[in-house]
Image (cartoon, rainbow, N blue to C red):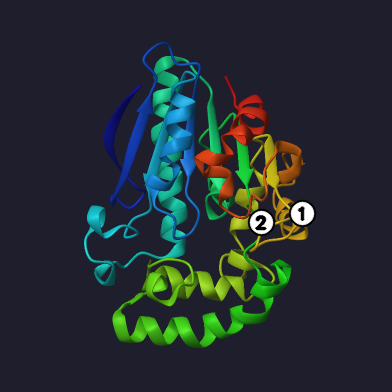
Amino acid sequence: MITEDTRFPAEDGEPVAGLWFLPDGDVVGVVAIAPAMAMPMRFYRHTAAWLAERGFAVLTFSYRGSEPELYGPMRDSAATALDWYHDAEAAAVHARDRADAVGAPLTWLGHSFGGQSLGFLSDVGVDRCVMVASGTGWRGKAAPMIKTWSPLLWRVIAPAAVAVLGYYPGRWLRILDDLPGGVMRQWGRWCLHPDYLFSELPELRDRFAKVETPVSALWTADDELITPDSIRYWSREFPGTEFELVEMRAADHGLSRIGHSGFFRPKRAILWERLLLPRLAR
């Protein structure tokens, strides 16, 4: 396996940083891993390397402004949550180009926020999509704890922190991770509305309806952020696709728990073998 740094332009010309994990031999398929909100691309390196060892060319990438070592000080970032969806679209185009070059199909592997971005990929030609813990961001369908404290976060804590520091200091607050101020503000508005991003961008529903990519949505009952109802609620935004709901039961795989992000941790690689690998386009 080898790694390859890459940069590619988003729709507005802004550069998006990425890292390819490439197999030593023939490529059987291409996978693009779209990160969750506030999750750095290095978090997915173990999954990417594991897939590369099995013949997949895997792209990980980082949303603009999300990692200071790649994009500079976060307080200087003008990024919005909508920009991040467009960064995902650019990543899909970049991955599609490699897939076409080697004659292999493309799978979009989206974690949480990253899975939501499938709605922006109707013109890219993604062959398969696997969403992991990806539902609507609307707090009304979130886990009970999120329902309780999220209005305080979105209406008081986050706006005050962004006003003072110029970005959201999630690492210091121990709520999410650091985020550009524009991303946090826009995402917060969406999360407080039943229509989520469509509350500000209703025209996007037509774009989402054009998606025909078959979807496998993996979820677990011990997710601390979203619920099965959240995933079902989100699936209705993709009326043109086949949507498979797959419950991951920790005990069935000899695990104590999985949680919202545990799927991508190397100690849970058994889930990659049993649930992910059979659902990738190859």
Q: Amino acid at mark 2?
A: Gly
Corner quadrant of residue 210? top right
Corner quadrant of residue 92? top left
Would residue 111 appear left or right of 185 to someone viewing this image?
Answer: right
Residue bearing mark 1:
232
Corner quadrant of residue 198? bottom right
Residue under the image location 61 percent in, 81 percent down: 149
Q: Amino acid at mark 1?
A: Arg
| Image position, residue 172 (x, y; %) | 38, 75
Q: Image height check: is 116 above or below 18?
A: below
| Image position, residue 101 (x, y; %) | 39, 18
| Image position, residue 125 (x, y; %) | 54, 31
On the question of residue 247 being in view, the answer is no
Residue bearing mark 2:
135
Would residue 245 appear left or right of 147 to someone viewing this image?
Answer: right
| Image position, residue 76 (x, y; %) | 24, 70
Residue under the image location 68 percent in, 34 percent down: 214
Q: Image height check: is 182 above or below 256?
A: below
Q: Image height check: is 156 above or below 23?
A: below
53 or 235: which is nearer to us? Answer: 53
Residue under the image location 62 percent in, 67 percent down: 196
